Structure formats: C-alpha cells, structure tokens
Image (spheres, rainbow, N blue to C red):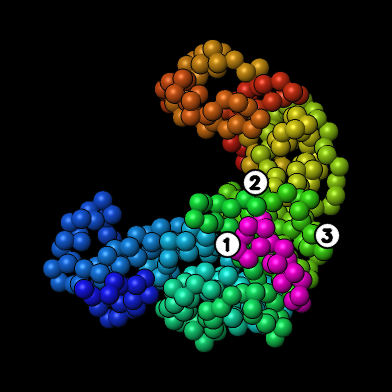
Amino acid sequence: MPAPITPLDAFAALLTDEGRALLDGLRDYDPSQELATATRLRREHPAELVSAALGQARLRQRAVAKFGAEDAYRMFFTPNGVEQATRASVALHRARRFEALGVRSLADLCCGNGGDAIALARAGISVLAVDRDPLTCEVARANAEALGLADLIEVRCADVTDVDTSAYDAVFVDPARRGGRGRIFDPEAYSPPLSWAIEAARSAPRAALKIAPGVPHEAVPDDAEAEWISDGGDVKEAVLWFGTGPGTRRATLLPGGASLVGRGLPDPAVRPVGRYLYEPDGAVIRAHLVAEVAEELDGGLIDETIAYVTSDELRATDHAAAYEITDVLPFNLKKLKAIVRERGIGVAVIKKRGSAVEPEELRKKLKLAGPNTSVIVLTRVAGAPAMLLGRPARPTG
C-alpha cells in the first residue's frame, strides 16, 4: 500500500506547472458543483492533486474578501491562515505606520500565510517571517514568490520564542487566538501567550502586537499605545504599539484613515434627544473615545450607558454616522406598526443599542410595505426603552 499523501506533499503538487494550471482553471469554480467538477478533473489529473486544488480554490474564494481578487487568486492559503489573516487594508495601514517610524527591517512573529509580511515588504521593509508550522511556512514562502517579494521576505520555520530579534528595527507579533475548539478568550492561552508577546515587543525599539478588539482596557500595559481599527465600519482588531506613545488610546477608521486620539475627557452629559443622532464608529466605542466625538459635535449622550451622541446641529465628522431624527417615542410595538403602515415604510434600517428587542424579529412583525424608507433605532433614552425614527443625514456645502 502506498504511503498516504501528507499536507506538505499535496501543497508541493500545487506548485508544479500542472498544479498551477489546474488552480488557474478553478478561479470561477462553483463549490455547489464540487462532485461534478471533481469527477471531470480526475479524468485528466491525479485524484490527490484534484482534491488539493479544489480545497485551495475554496480558500482563495474566501480570501478575496480580505486580500482582493488580484492577490487572492495568486496566493495560497491554509484554512487557519484565511481565518486569522489580517485584512489587506489593515495590514497596509500598519505597514505605513512602521514605515513612518523609520523601520527598515522587521521580525514578523507568527506570520501565518504571510499577509502582514506582504504589506510590510510592499512598504519597502525587509521582513523575517517566522512560524512553527512547516506547511504554513511553505505557504508563506510561496506567497512571497508569487507576489514578487521573495527578495524582501525571508521565511523561517521555528518556534518564535527561540528567535533572536535583536538585529531588527521592529517586531510584529500576531499570536494565534484560535485553537481546535474555536476562539481562545484567555490571553495566556494564546500561542504564544500574551505575556510572552508583550515582553518580546518591549525588547525591540519599535513593536506592534495584534490582539482581540474586545481586550479590557485595564489589560493594556501602561507603556503601550492601544489602537482600535475598523474597516468599513466593522471593528477588525486592536494593536498594542510599543516605542510610540505610551498611554495613548487611538481609533483608526479605514478605508479613509481618519484617526481619533483620546484626550482623557470626562463622560459627556446626558441631554434630551435633539434633531440629530450620531452613531460613533465601532473603533471609537471600543477605544472609549465617545467623549471626544461628543466634544467634536458639541453634543451629549441620550443615556449615560448608551454610546449615541445627540445634537441640534448637523456637523461633518469622520468618526460617526449621522441621522436626522423625526420621532422620539417610548418603545411600543403597536404604535410602531401603526407608524410604519401609515407612512408606507417598505424599507427600514433597524439599529439597536441597549435594547432587548432583536431587529430581525421586529422586522418580521412590522410587515414592511410601501415606497418609503426609514431608520428605526431601538435604544434607551434617559434610562427608558425608546424608539427613534429618522433618516440618514449628510452635511451640505
């Protein structure tokens, strides 16, 4: 009986001319037709190669959301690598920060499939990319070659705790936060543990440490800058920076790149709901910078525990979405159904913060029908359940 094909063997087959040609032909592959596709391809190619190519085609399709089609369909991935990879826009932002700090060489510890290393190399930074998994290292190496960056990215298969980083200008650490049973919530169960990653970061002149965006603020070291990053309104990650601004709290909003830095402001006052409601970006909320947004907008909170800012004036801001409010009412389903019916609301954006009502369940009960649109906000106002109706507002001029 022949020896079973190892994951490394299967991946090596994908790098052959036959494997690459097979993958190129699967760019528009439909996963729902996998059996028929596999049957057809096995008439001309080894079964093991077909299985590896189909698996890689699925991973590339998933990776498009993070890397874009141009890169994703030239790159290679492992399942965990796709799951944990940094979105390309976020990696580019971080690479530009390192570049602005004068970093010319960097040790990328726990490099995964090489997404961050690619962004760093494209910024002209020489990268040592380290991972302990042999297959992951082969994938990272293949990606550097596929994107023409092999001269700037050295891939080393090793335990990151054994790597001497003293020769590098900076260190980037991205500990594995998923295990065999899913997401890991205990930072000391990260691989490597968060405590080790922090000390590794402190040992370098400049460093960044990627962590989960839900990190408690009290867990952020005093000598670190903490940056929360969103992309398209979705919070993607938090980063601890060392060698920049100790104690700084920052929210960065991509793709525009707007950045809000904390100034230690006290909590805003609560005031009645005005003409406009502002919803701070998720990164702003995670960074505890709602007070900075309220000051920017000359506004206040609608409730001391709710991150909605209200004002009677419409002001342009990069840090929050604005809505013009037409109705402020105690929450009452019967009343809301009547309003929706009377106004012919067929399309509604339903938002919630501080409400037990689930938007999709409410949507079913409202039976939306008609030509008009509305924004419905389920929240609390001065401690009481409320519903706010309105529309998106955009400053003119």
Q: Which label lies toward us, 2 or 3?
A: 3
Mark 3 lies on a secondary structure that is: loop
Which of marks 3 and 1 precedes in the sequence?
1
Quadrant (top left, top right, bottom left, bottom right) of the N terminus: bottom left
Mark 2 is on which residue type? Gly
Query: For numbered disc 1, what is the local secondary structure?
Result: loop
Query: Disc 1 or disc 3, which is closer to the eye?
Result: 1
> Residue most toward the left?
43
Whether 190 is among the magenta residues is yes
Q: Badge 1 is on which residue?
A: 176
Residue 282: mark: 2
Residue holding disc 3: 222
Q: Amino acid at mark 1?
A: Ala
Q: Position of residue 213 (x, y in %)?
A: 65, 52
Q: Residue at x 57, y 62 (%)?
A: 176
Query: Of the residues shown, which amino acid type is indicated by label 3?
Result: Asp
Frontmost residue, 63 versus 100:
63
Image depth: mark 1 or mark 2 in front: 1
Marks 2 and 3 in Cβ contact (< 8 Å): no
Among numbered discs 1 and 2, the one appearing first in the sequence: 1
Q: Residues within 10 Å of mark 1 (few under 14, many from 20)?
A: many
Where disc 2 sits, the SS reads: helix
Number of numbered discs visible in the structure rendering: 3
Q: Residue at x 83, y 39 (%)?
A: 267
Q: Position of residue 261 (x, y in %)?
A: 77, 55
- Mark 2 closeness class: few <14, some 14–19, many ≥20 residues within 10 Å: many
**Region rendered in magenta:** 187-205
